[in-house]
Amino acid sequence: MQNAVDFINGVIWSPALVYLCLGTGLFFSIVTRFVQVRHFGEMWRLLMSGESSKEGISPFQALTVSLSGRVGTGNIAGVAAAIGFGGPGAVFWMWVVAFLGAATSYIECTLGQIYKEEQEGQYRGGPAFYIEKALGQKWYAWIFALATILATGILLPGVQSNSMGNAIVTALGTGETVETAMGALSFAKIATGTAIVLLLGFIIFGGVKRIAHFTQFVVPFMALGYIIIASVIIALNISELPGIIALIIGDAFNPMAGIGAAIGWGVKRGVYSNEAGQGMGPHAAAAAEVQHPAQQGLVQAFAVYIDTLFICTATAFMILITGAYNVYGTGEGVIVQNLAADVAANSPAYTQTAIESVLPGVGNLFVAIALFFFSFTTILAYYYIAETNVSYLQRDLHIPGFTFFLKVVLMASTFYGTVRTANLAWALGDIGVGLMAWLNIIGILIIFFIAKPALKALRDYERQQKAGVESYHFDPEALDIKNAHFWQNKKRN
């Protein structure tokens, strides 16, 4: 099965997708006149403005729901894998894809707001909605919805829970081995999987409001705590930092693992981590209560910075500054070996070793706790995204118990991922991410060339901003944006 999955992965994550992600980010950066730079101050202001409503969550809650999806195992184990298989230079390409991806995130998340709907007392939206309404291609929207349910409901939760299980084993040991129908399993992993599933069930059966309240409290604290620990480690080795930055930049253009490996792994793990272009961010963006769609687009663009430029960079600096990594070539050989050869790059082990080397007795347990919160909140975001796409399909299917079935399947996938091997979990997750990225990026590019709704929304917002209005408004008909039914009805009411 591993060989079959690896083959499919190689097809989906061909160089074409890598350069499509970079090229799309560069294109949207140019056409928006680098919105991710020009409106940095406005992004920060918008984070703390706005309130929730009966139907929608606040902009800050939408940011934390989105960040809960962006900030996950990719920030710890994903960065380690990028370094392990792409070399230190892969970190540079993660920075590039984050900077350019912020513009892509603005476009897709603004589209999510423009074409959102109100369903059963809450806002829903995402790529399936804007593909249908802006392109008029319902079949394409259905393909995206089905691919997203497959990815976020089945394939991706196992990646997050797998890292949680591995981190617990590294910190506390495997415990006794238990014979099960799935073979011999570690008691520690079984106990971890059970605890995760019980807590997960309690929250997801409470709906999006419960998810938003949980992430609003947990995400800021977990991110801040992680960055503080990283800052301590970097400060204790501050003399090494200039050399590490030089290593990253130098290896980006003359990579020890090969230019293809550096760019490929940097972009792959960058997209996996910050989700720019992948189509996940628009789901949370659409749930927000805002005066103007561009506002949530700007907030979500800032989320890319938080994820990659802050948290992923903190992980990379910790690993590189302590030398807690290996670099593997395209074959089976080890190019750089600082750790035992059997230390898995697709795991939290590099990060745990890095912290443990500076703060003995802290690293293993701290990373296990950080990964629990990072990964658990990401699984919550995956559920919300999958549920949104189920609700999209249910408009036509009306299948009884579809949402309940999704909850059960996602919980089963989470448990299975906790106890199985890392390589298979990551490979399946990469397939899910790649499918969504292909479908969404092609969709938003076609939408841009047909109607440019997100760019029109940006210009309209900037016009009102320049005029100094106290309260923003959005009139899609005046901007020649069709099928934005929610905003049309809001204007009439």
Image (cartoon, rainbow, N blue to C red):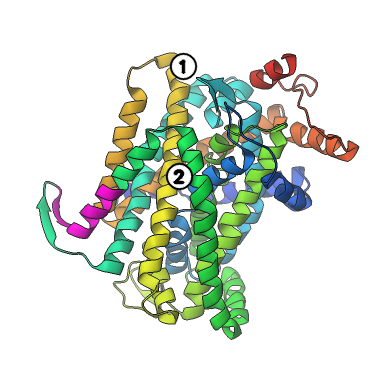
27 sits left or right of 347 in the view: right
Q: Residues within 10 Å of mark 2 (few under 14, many from 20)?
A: many
Q: Quadrant of residue 153?
A: top left
Q: Viewer-nearest of labels 2 and 1? A: 1
Q: Is residue 264 visible?
A: no
Q: Is 182 or 447 nearer to us in this picture?
A: 182
In this rendering, is residue 380 above or below 84?
above
Q: Which residue is mark 2?
A: 433
At label 1, the amino acid type is Arg
User: Is 206 inside the magenta-drawn segment?
Assistant: no
Alpha carbon distance from label 2 to label 1: 25 Å
Q: Is 74 or 487 nearer to us in this picture?
A: 487
Q: Quadrant of residue 390?
A: top left
How far across and down, in percent of the image, does residue 112 sit? 61, 32
Count of numbered tags = 2
Q: Is 463 or 121 nearer to us in this picture?
A: 121
Identify the residue at image location x=49%, y=48%.
68
The magenta region covers: 182-195
In this rendering, is residue 250 above or below 451?
below
Q: Which residue is mark 1?
A: 395
User: Which of marks 1 and 2 precedes in the sequence?
Assistant: 1
